[in-house]
Amino acid sequence: MSVKIDPETAVMDLPRRDARDKLTGRTRYMVDMAGSDALRAVIVRAKVASAKIVRLDVSAAARMRGVRAIATAADAPELHGIGIQDQPLFARDRIRYPGEPICAIAADTLEQARAAADAVLLELEDLPACFSMADALAPDAPILHPDWKNYECIVDGVARAGNIAWEAKVLRGDVDAAFARPDVTIVESCFRVGRQSHMPFEPRGALASYEDGRYHIITSTQVPWTVRAVTAKVLGVHSSLVRVTVPPVGGAFGLKFDCSIEPMAAILSRKTGRSVSLVNSREEETTTCLCRENADIWIRSAITPEGTIAGREGVVLMDAGAYGGEQVFLSTMTAHTLGASYRLGAARFSTRVIYTNTPPNGAFRSCNGAYNAFALERHTDEICQKIGMDPMAFRKKNVLRDQDLGSTGQVFEGDVLGPMLERMEALRASTGTQEHRAAGRLYGRATTVGTWNIFVGPSTATVNLNADGSATLITASVEIGSGSITQGVPQIVAANLGIHPSKVIVKGADTDAAGYDMGTGGGRTVVSMGSAATAACAVVRKRLLETASELLQTKPENLVLRDGRVEIEGRPGSGTAIETVIARAEQTQGPISGSGSFTAPGTAKAMPGCAAGHFFDAMDLPVFVVHEGEVAVDPETGEVEVLAYRVVQDVGRAINPRAVRGQIQGAVIQGIGYGLHEQITIGPSGAIEQTGFETYHIPLAQDAVKVDIDLFEGAPSCGPLGTKGVAEVAIMNGGATMACAIANATGKKVQQLPLVASRVLGLVEGFEEMLEHPHISRKWSDNILK
Amino acid sequence: MSRNIPRDTMALPESVDEALDILAASDIETVPIAGATWIMRGPTRYEPIPPRLVALNRIAELREYDFDSDPIHLGAMATHDLIARSLPSGADLRCLALAAHQSANPGIRRLATVGGNLCVVGFAAADLVPALMVLDATVCLALPGRRRLELDLSEFMAFRRKPGRYLTTGVRFARNARISAHVRVPMRDYPVCIVSLSVGMDASGRIADLRLAVGAVEEDGRRWKEFEDEARGSEPDPVAMGELARKLSTTLTPRSAHDAPGWYRVQVLPAMVRRAFAQVRAEMR
Amino acid sequence: MDVQFFVNGEERTFGGDQRTPLLDVLRGDFRLTGTKSVCRGGFCGACTVLIDGEPVPSCQRPVGLLEGAEITTIEGMAPVGELNLVQQAFLDHDVVQCGMCFPGMVITLTHFLGSNPMPGRAEIKEALAGNMCRCTGYERIVDAVLSICPTEQAEDQPPVPEVSER
């Protein structure tokens, strides 16, 4: 039986099926679904960063007009967390950050719920607080989680202590020996980044109801199965009692890769017997955003006279905020970002996740990759400056190539970054540069590289064939705007079944209908769900071809699926319509349906003993980018204009090239926002000071630049049809490229992001204080728990 | 908003006096609204919308705009968009045209009014204020008891902070023979530094008559008299003017806010002054 | 006092609090949820509607001001089942991602093209100063708009700020 699918049949600029309704305002997002029958709920949140809860009295609030129910910590007894189960749904005996939920109130109207919130009595006793990682690491620092030793962890035996929520280590080769070599040049750099806020247009929230003894949560999430599991966990009920469905999501970018306030709505729906709508206000959404974390980075390299990297060591401090969350998991990615891209003789990295009394952080498109790329690429340029080597020549000489070792000893397959650098030079030659438009301003250009991982992992899909020749694809993948489940996966299914993608119906995510999926994010949907769907299609194809074989009196091996027909290979127009075969199968064996599954192939291996505290030691599916930016810096105002931007991206195979380019364009502008405009500050009380679009500046149309894109195809991939995730990694080098280009333009040492105008002017004028990171020891081994 | 709040949360007077009577008679917080763009986004600043609003949009007097007269009179309801579209071309008015055109975004410019821009205390980045200051604009006020008052804009900036019920009915400014300019940074969002100027030269080409106002730097926009005094009699050379601004920048008391630290506002000021004078020079050629 | 006005050509009455933003009346009372509530401060443009033909953020309009006004929401920009030119261009160019900003984008740009039939790239971007998008990076939106302009403009360069005279 022929199982070879010609990948080219999947390649097309398929338009989005959801565009028409989105353009006419008819799409119903979660925030649009609550009608007049639904109660409205609000969250009462802590106004202080650190306190003991002496007494919570909701009795007066409960008696207020219109109030139907109040949910408190008593309704959600259990802790949850991605790596460490350290977080309650509602603060129980202790408040750890400003904005932490205390209770939630459902009432007939939002105004009534808000009025009742003002009537909640909360008696507190102040506790000391840490607002920065330096504070939290101080010897006498107050411990946020005095009970840390008793928390459940997903991985055993990880180094943790007090405010150090998690520690991941990499150790390969003899780094001390590399630094002790008499012939090496040692280059050392310190970096700091602020938080980045996702600012999805649709905030987090849920519409929950309690139906037939089960919770039904309609939510704006990337991870329906996580919402199901966490809701069940914190409520202390069986997971099977929770159903999660997901309408189109109005932007997510990683923010919605965790359960958030959904369980609160679930509790209130059970207590009232009504539908309950709970949606963050913009101010709540912004001030409790699970941001890309702020981080402090120290990195040091020993460079040989030939310009190779004999040894590299680094320390990354990641601010978790008050709870471990995604940062615990993401500590793994230092090895695969800061420790990647370049060939290292010996390497050691310590990554520490630090608790502070600030709002918890989370996942944001490319996560810590975005700032580790910044640190790595600025460090690389500082190396080049110190040894007097051309930055492009240095990169070409040192980027990972076929059979090179990564920091954990993983062997990289294929020569990807090197040829991509050459393609970037060719792209620049074809577009020309924009230096002439700097017009008296300081001009800078920089080329940066980056490595990221496609987060494969468990997915499952079902494909049903319908009598009309269409197929229904049932998955728990979510449409978050990336197109992966409205374009990519249906294209893969269609190519497998020889039908047009418009004939592939995509069922909206529903945990009652579809099997487990890790979630939509991390660049994984086309790869993981695409693989699961491919496996489902294999079952379907087998039955189709066997039935057709009887009908057409020829062996299944001689048959192909093409243009909605089952044809005899080499004889276009022969055979019969797929509908005929489906009808026949229904009569003889029953309708055709198939399911398939996929998870991490697990083929990539690290060297034993190189990594500790990691969730995975080697990357199953590395993905690479080369970015180049040209900037003009106004030396009098510090304002930066991006004159040009070019991307060469490793996409495996682009099955929808136009959509891929759309994702890259959008991600790059978000990355430029991270580099230049988007600033979160933590105020003196530990709170995020930005409250919405007025104070947090996402790029506007006039800040954007048209990105010149070259799609690099053909790198090794375990993805279906050779695909890789494309939407996640495209943001990664935005900050790095802006920083390196501005450093080149100004001749100044750029150590921090974002490079808002005042910071750039401070650099130009020499006001900007140089970072030293006294809370990171220059003796690497002092930065690990013994 | 809920249905059980008393229904008369908005009054819609037809005349200035009726509006003042409503304000005088109110026993709850009552706030006049023109474009309403400050009030309506109050909740984003943790300020609830006041319990009672007095809408000014039906008052004909506030919608009288004499763009072609001299002095020009703009009723308080003149929007930024209307000003940008309707102001006669002329070097003397360029500062106001630019200020109106560069403010906020197109949707807000269609709503936000000159009256609102002048009256809102706490909005340091109002674009029109410095531009009107260098045009020697006066603010027309209606006071209780059918009284009318016209105040110099700089006087009004202090007056508006005092308690008391009044209505701003409009602004008035005379055409002049000076050349004006307006620059701001950044071009997006709210500005962190605004410079408006209006300058007349004597026969030898030296500065004879100068008004220069700075916005967004201090809590309120103001005429920079220290600069005006020193610059009088000099060549309007942009570079020299920028240098003078640098020398005198200690005479300003900059505010720090989310969008920029105080030092930054002052640091960019010399360049803003230089660019404003460069606009003037371009106009002179 | 009831407020009466027209929404997408239909006379509607609102009897609640006159301070209520038009945005909430459209979404909550009339269930016209195509108008999106995002920033509530007049910054993002997702709630843009036409009031008497002018695109403005509906979050900034207390409904009491709208007696007799003619309001067009995204639901009224084209007959059911049809798309206007701008919508069709966005569809054809595969511009949409999460989609939340597009109702506002469509209204702003449809109005803009009515008064500027032959805009350049920079003018389109300037017109979008009050319509934020978090997904797309804008440029393909601009490309789509340029594709329906009668005469495609040459790739005009954004203006260079004044920094000479140093």
Image (cartoon, rainbow, N blue to C red):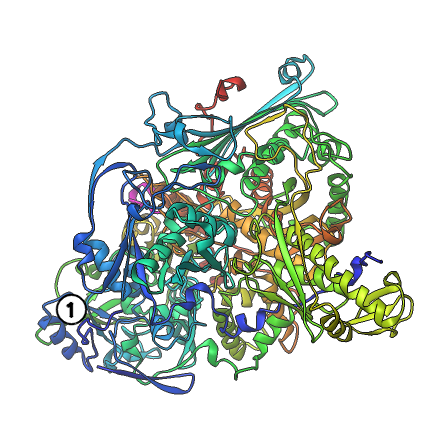
Label 1 is found on which chain of the structure?
A: B
Q: Is residue A384 above or below residue B137?
A: above
Q: Main secondary structure of the magenta part?
A: loop
Extreme residue toward the right, this view: A570
Given the image, on which type of amino acid does mark 1 rest?
A: Tyr
Is A84 drawn above or below residue C53 in the view shown?
above
Q: Is residue B91 visible?
A: no
* Position of A333 relative to A65 (above/below): above
Q: Is residue A387 highlighted in magenta?
A: no
Location of mark 1 (residue):
B166
Residue at the outermost front position: A588
Give percent across and percent down for residue A718.
Answer: 72, 46
Q: Is residue A404 above or below residue C48?
A: above
Which span of residues is magenta-colored? B249-258
Residue at x 37% of width, y 77% of height: C30
Question: Label 1: few (<14), some or many (≥20) within 10 Å?
Answer: many
What residue lies at 75% left-to-right and 70% top-to-bottom?
A588
